[in-house]
Amino acid sequence: MPRIPTPRRVADNVNHRRTRTVEDSRMPLTEHLRELRNRVAKALIAFVLATVVCFFFEQHILNFLMHPYCSLPAHKRASFQGQTCQLYVFGILDPFMIRLKISAIAGAIASSPVWLYQLWSFITPGLHRHERRWSLTFVALSLGLFAVGACFAYITLRTGLNLLLGFSGDGIVSVLDANKYLSYVIAMVLIFGASFEIPLLVCLLNLAGVVPTAKLRAWRRSEIFLTFLFAAIVTPSQDPFTMLALGLPMIVLYEVALFVGWLNDRRKKNRGDGSAYAELADDEASPLDFDDSGETARRAALAARAQQDDRAGRKARAKLAAMAQAQPGDDAGGSSADIT
């Protein structure tokens, strides 16, 4: 019989989950494949159920997607049998396929918390605690930026359609294919959402130490030109308004990424270079027996801290004693024995 979940048991369970390490996630390959299969199955079940539910609300979703087109002036839209706003199909299976496409896309969005949780649960056991914290932060930021880009694309759809359909003049009225219109809307949302992730990628490269901010600032003019060139190529309509609507926010987000990178470089400079190669010149080769793991530097720092009489000194002496027991033949072990 299962025990009643009391607040203490819930807290103990949460603390137990938080203290899991990478060693706890070690399992045979077959177990990893079995866990992957189970999580993929759960994600697919959630996607299918959400698609079925969205299938019954497909008309409301279609009206929402058609709103940018229906809000255009009446003389730019073809109307038959007294209808003010219509999309047209030219195939027998097109009505069903369009309804299925809309339901599948809406189902993928509605079930995203489930399949994102399954993906996150499969990856996190192999990460350290600080890696989980950083990865969770970047996942949350990437989802937020994608949502902002998608909303920005939806807002600019009406102006872009008004500009493009306005070139027809007074003697031509647009009769839009439903498949092509929905493909255009989906492409706009995906392209805007994915493009808004590029500044986050730049920020991630800077935090990882791959590209310094000074070098990025030196390339600013070229980067602005390449941003607008990228916006002109990837936008489905390739009109000037949509290019500016995509390029200008990307420039603003890129400047924010540069500011974050500048803060990170300044923090590293104030803290000092903690790398094992900090004492070597840029053109100096490291010895073959060079300790690049930082173990020697850590032991030296512990030995210096162990000279103190406070609590930090006692902890340092205890750590040196533990390291001496793990490696009794090490020189640092002898120094720690003398200290204690």
Image (cartoon, helix red, strand yellow):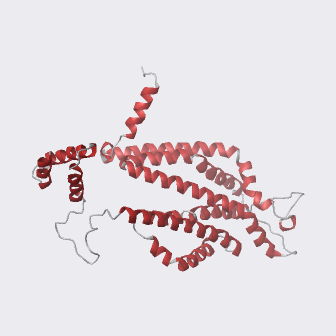
Picture quarter containing residue 12?
Answer: top left
Residue 186 seen anywhere in this rendered image of the structure: yes
Q: Image check: 98 left or right of 287?
A: right
> Which residue is pictured at 71% across the width and 72% down the height?
241
Q: Image check: 257 left or right of 241?
A: left
Q: Image check: 234 left or right of 261?
A: right
> Which residue is pictured at 59% across the width and 61% down the height?
193
Q: Position of residue 276 (x, y in %)?
A: 26, 64
Give the vertical position of 263 relative to 320 (above or below). Answer: below
The residue lying furthest to the front in this view is 309
For this rendering, which residue is in front, 312 or 290? Answer: 312
Quarter of the rendering occupied by the N terminus: top left
Q: Where is residue 267 in the image (x, y as percent from the top left)?
A: 42, 62
Picture quarter containing residue 286?
Answer: bottom left
> Which residue is pictured at 67% across the width and 61% down the height?
152
For this rendering, which residue is in front, 243 or 324? Answer: 324
